[in-house]
Every structure is written in C-alpha cells, then in structure tokens.
Image (cartoon, grey):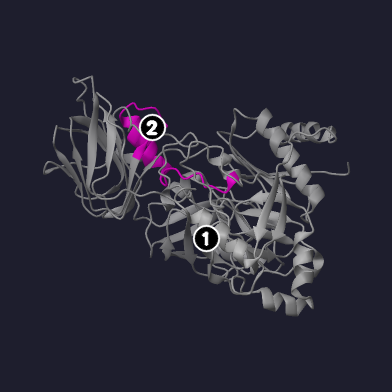
C-alpha cells in the first residue's frame, strides 16, 4: 500500500497521525483499522484516541512512545488489510425530505438543478461510512456524498438547527443529534432519538449508536410515518 | 446530584453552590471517539496540590468552584484542603488562608466568598469524595454529555476520617503558589498547521499582547488582539488536543481547554503547554497573555 502516515507531536502527551489529505472511503478504512489496532496495542498508555476522516489523535498518560515505535505499529496494523479488525454495523435512518422541516431543501434543489425525487435518490441510494464522531456527542460524519449535492458549509451558521436535522457540508452528510447552532445545509429531518445518554448503564449500546467504520443508509419516509415515529420517540413508554 | 447513603460517610451540602461548581478529577478516558469531551479539573496544578496536601490518591475527585460565592455545610468532621483562587474563606466564621489543609468540625460551614484573585477553587476532602465514575472519571456529566453543575441543596458523600489524630496543618510553600494577577506567558508547542501559517502571522502571534475576552470558559479561552490571517482553504476536521490554539475566520485565537469539542475543522497554530493552560484557566476576562515558542 502506497501510504506513509505522518506522525507529529502536538504537545507533551499527544500525537497526531495524518494518513492523507482528502477524506475518502479508503482513508476512512485505514484510519479505522489503525485506531482499533493501536487502541488494543497501546491500551495501557492511552487516555483517549480520536479517529477523524484523515487523521488519528492519540493522547497518552505520560510521554508518548517514539515516532519509530508508532510507525512500526502502524505498518503492522496496515500490513494485513484484508483481515477485518471490525465488523461494521449497518444503520438504516428514516428521513423526511420536506421543506417544512428542511430549511435549505429548496435552495439546494435550485442550485443543483435537481427535483426533489432526484435529490432524494442521490442522498438515499448510497451506503455511507462513518468517518468520525464529534462536533457534538453522537454526531457522525458520513461520507462520501455525491458530488452533485456536495455543497460547502454556509457562510453564516444558523443560530439554531433542530435536533434530527440531516445536513450536508462538502462531501460529508450528518444528523444533528440535538438542537444546536450549525452551518450545514439542511435537507431533511430524522425522527429518531440520536443523542446518546451517557448516564445509562451502557451508553454506547443505545440505538442507533454509530461507531467509526459503520455503514449508514438513509431511507425516505412520508410525513405521516415521520410524525408517528416522532410521537413514539417522545413517548415516555419508549 | 445525590449520592446513596453509605454508613461511615459524611455529607457535604451545597447551601450556596455558586454559579458553576462541579466535581472534577483528571478527566474521562476512552470517551473522545464518541464526541464526548474528557472534562477534568481546569487548573490541574491547584487540583494536584489539593489532593497531595491530604495524601489523597492523585486522581481523587475535587469540587471545582468557579468564582463563588459558595457555602458548604459538613455533616461530620472532615480534613479538607482548599487550593487555587483566593478570597476571605472561613470555616465557622474563622478565616482560613488558601493553599492549605484545615479541619472542619461536625455541622460546620465553609464559606467561600467571590474569588479575589484567580477564578477557580479546588476543595478536596481527606479520602476523596464518593461518587460514581463514568468513563473512569468523577467529572460531573449530564446525560447528553454536557457539564453537570451543582444546584442549591445538592449533596456529596465523603469518608469520615478514621485517623482523628491527623490534625497537622499543611500548606503549599509560598514559592509554589502562582500569582494569578501576573501577565501570563503561554509556551506554544508549534504543531498542527503551524508551518502553514505565514511568517508574518507567526511573528504577530509572538510579538502581540492578547487580552482575554468575556468568552472564556471551560471549553476555551477566546483572546482579543492582532488578528492572525489563515490564507489557505478549509482543513479536514481533525482531533483537537488539550491547549490547541485555534484560529477561526476572524483571526482571534482561541485556546481550547478541558470541555472543548473533540474534533474541529479550523486551523490551529500549535498547542499551549499543559502547565500554562492550568494558569490560563485561573485568569479572567480583561487579563493579558503573550505567546512564546516552547523550547522543548
């Protein structure tokens, strides 16, 4: 594999490994693989590890291992790349694509010269990969979005984006797990509860809990189904 | 936040919790890949001393009290340490200087007036507070991942001191007590996009004096001063290290601290050393900071 990950020390106890420049399915697989391998092999020394689209951050309890040591671990991690270290989970996410809940839908259709059906088709027929989790807990960066609907972040972020909003920024799509400010173009809304509950017994088991490397596909739903799922989600008997 | 009643424990009650008080330690582990910040004591230095003075384990939880005023009632006698910010703190009306250990009697109240210098007090009890750990940490957490702060009447459990004889008072040697009023120099480790910023930008960073803006909190400290221009395009979102100095489009640097986002797509010009981040977290809006290149 033609790959030379660059290791740099960010501060006294943190390293950043850069695997490439542009987010892609292939890079995400490499980052995910390296993350799981290093987490296992450096478990005792690591405090936190943060995989992202093209990078992996490693925070250590004390002084980090040498660059040479990390590079040698990485080459081991990537040598046997046919052998999976993680079986990805598959998530199906229902989305209502409707201007009533998606403030940027009309603008995106206009800019891309697509009608609603074509836009839905482009957004739903791809299986996306979870490249990273962050921005806020439970927010998954999903790639890659079809070029025809890959719009940059808005120049001025919105003060409030509703929980469940499905947005696009560059070649990444994602769902806001809770209401927050945000600059992504909003094209739909998901009625599911996506905000993790970190005080529950097993916070990562709560569906749909995304993990880096997982597969996500969107499916279009109608308003009635959206409302019934939303009601179920809000129900105390959930 | 309530802790289950256990025998042999005392109860501390926050009669007045102050605007932002939480339980903190060295922070959560193995959580940042979920987008959850690690939290932890904003002033790791004062936190360390509070535990060390009491011979507590160095990861025992402390109460981090931002600004004050705060009033804390103890149900049972306890040996405590108070480090960090200073004000005219009293136990049952008797003044206690900061950065030392003190004995609180049964049913006595510790009062912490608004901080005069510094911003955050660290209160430790002998044996450490008893609370549930999440991601191997006592740091206060809401279900959604945000910081949980104590409300009026909240209680915390602490072990009742068995060693009644250990009433020896200890304090931190004066030379080891930082002066939070002094102008602060932040040692910058050049990393992230440092080499991609223009030479002029880097010169500006090291020659300017920055003022702490009113937007300073546990997530990050926003600075005001000479704007630093990033002349390249967007960068791919990447993990954010403790102390990272982020340069948003307006060019005003932000030093990112304990409750920062785990990943972000703004350029970063390097990271401030942890020791200097601790000192920064005790500064207030309006105070001045400078950057110097770390020689490590």
Residue A120, above or below B93: below
Q: Is residue B24 visible?
A: yes
Which is more N-terminal, label 2 or label 1? 2
Residue B83 picture location, percent across and down: 31, 41
**Camera-side mark, 1 or 2:** 2
Task: Look at 27% across and 30% down and name the residue there.
Answer: B5
| Dot 1: chain letter | B
Horizontal and vertical percent position of residue B79 = 23, 30
> Regarding mark 1 in the picture, which secondary structure is present there?
strand
Residue B68, position as x, y percentages in the image = 26, 53
For label 1, the crowd category at 10 Å Cα-Cα, with few meaning under 14, some 14 to 19 and many 20 or more, is: many
Q: Nearer the viewer, residue A191 or A10?
A: A191
Residue found at x 47% / y 53%: A235
The span from disc 1 to disc 2 (Cα, nearest Å) is 30 Å
Could you say which quadrant of the image residue A144 lies in?
bottom right
Q: Is residue A199 left or right of residue B16?
A: right
On screen, residue B240 versus residue B127, left or right, reads right
- Based on the picture, tell me whether residue A67 belongs to the magenta stretch: no
- Residue that appears at 41% across and 30% down: B58
Residue A226 picture quarter: bottom right
**SS at badge 2:** loop
Part of the protein shown in magenta:
B34-62
Determine which residue is flagged by label 1: B254
**Residue pointed to by mark 2:** B60
């Amino acid at each position: 594999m033609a790959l030379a990950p660059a290791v740099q020390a960010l501060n006294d106890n943190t390293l950043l490994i850069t695997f490439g420049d542009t987010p892609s399915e292939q890079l995400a697989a490499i980052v995910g693989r390296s993350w799981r391998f290093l987490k296992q092999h450096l478990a005792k020394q690591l405090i936190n590890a943060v995989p992202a689209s093209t990078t992996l951050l490693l925070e250590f309890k004390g002084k980090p291992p040498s660059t040479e040591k990390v590079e040698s671990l990485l080459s081991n991690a990537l040598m046997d790349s046919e052998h999976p270290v993680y079986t990805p989970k598959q998530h199906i996410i229902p989305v209502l694509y409707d201007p009533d809940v998606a403030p940027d839908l009309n603008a995106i259709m206009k800019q891309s010269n697509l009608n609603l059906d074509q836009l839905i088709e482009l957004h739903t027929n791809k299986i996306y990969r979870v490249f990273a989790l962050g921005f806020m807990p439970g927010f998954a960066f999903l790639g890659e979005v079809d070029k025809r609907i890959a719009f940059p972040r808005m120049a001025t972020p919105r003060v409030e984006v509703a929980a469940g909003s499905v947005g696009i920024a560059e070649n990444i799509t994602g769902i806001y797990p809770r209401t927050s400010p945000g600059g992504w173009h909003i094209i739909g809304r998901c009625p599911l509860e996506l905000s993790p509950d970190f005080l529950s017994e097993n916070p990562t088991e709560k569906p749909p809990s995304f993990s880096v490397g997982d597969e996500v596909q969107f499916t279009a739903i109608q308003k009635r189904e959206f409302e019934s799922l939303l009601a179920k989600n809000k129900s105390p008997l959930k | 936040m309530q802790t289950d009643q256990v025998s042999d424990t005392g109860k501390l009650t926050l009669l007045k919790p102050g605007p932002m008080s939480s339980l903190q330690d060295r922070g959560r582990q193995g959580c940042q890949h979920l987008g959850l910040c690690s939290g932890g004591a904003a002033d790791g230095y004062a936190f360390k001393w509070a535990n060390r003075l009491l011979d507590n384990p160095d990861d025992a939880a402390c109460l981090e009290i931002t600004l004050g005023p705060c009033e804390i009632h103890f149900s049972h006698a306890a040996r405590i340490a108070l480090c960090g910010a200073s004000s005219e703190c009293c136990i049952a009306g008797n003044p206690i200087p900061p950065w030392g250990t003190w004995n609180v009697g049964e049913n006595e109240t510790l009062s912490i007036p608004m901080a005069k210098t510094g911003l955050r007090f660290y209160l430790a009890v002998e044996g450490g507070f008893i609370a549930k750990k999440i991601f191997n940490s006592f740091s206060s957490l809401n279900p959604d991942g945000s910081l949980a702060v104590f409300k009026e009447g909240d209680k915390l459990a602490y072990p009742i001191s068995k060693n009644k004889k250990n009433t020896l008072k200890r304090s931190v040697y004066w030379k080891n007590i930082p002066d939070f009023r002094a102008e602060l120099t932040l040692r910058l480790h050049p990393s992230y996009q440092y080499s991609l910023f223009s030479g002029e930008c880097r010169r500006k960073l090291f020659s300017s004096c920055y003022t702490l803006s009113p937007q300073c909190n546990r997530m990050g400290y926003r600075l005001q001063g000479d704007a630093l221009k990033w002349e390249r395009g967007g960068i791919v979102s990447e993990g954010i290290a403790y102390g990272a100095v982020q340069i948003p489009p307006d060019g005003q640097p932000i030093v990112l601290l304990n409750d920062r986002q785990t990943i972000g797509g703004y350029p970063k010009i390097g990271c401030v050393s942890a020791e200097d981040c601790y000192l920064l977290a005790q500064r207030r809006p309006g105070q001045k900071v400078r950057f110097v290149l770390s020689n490590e």
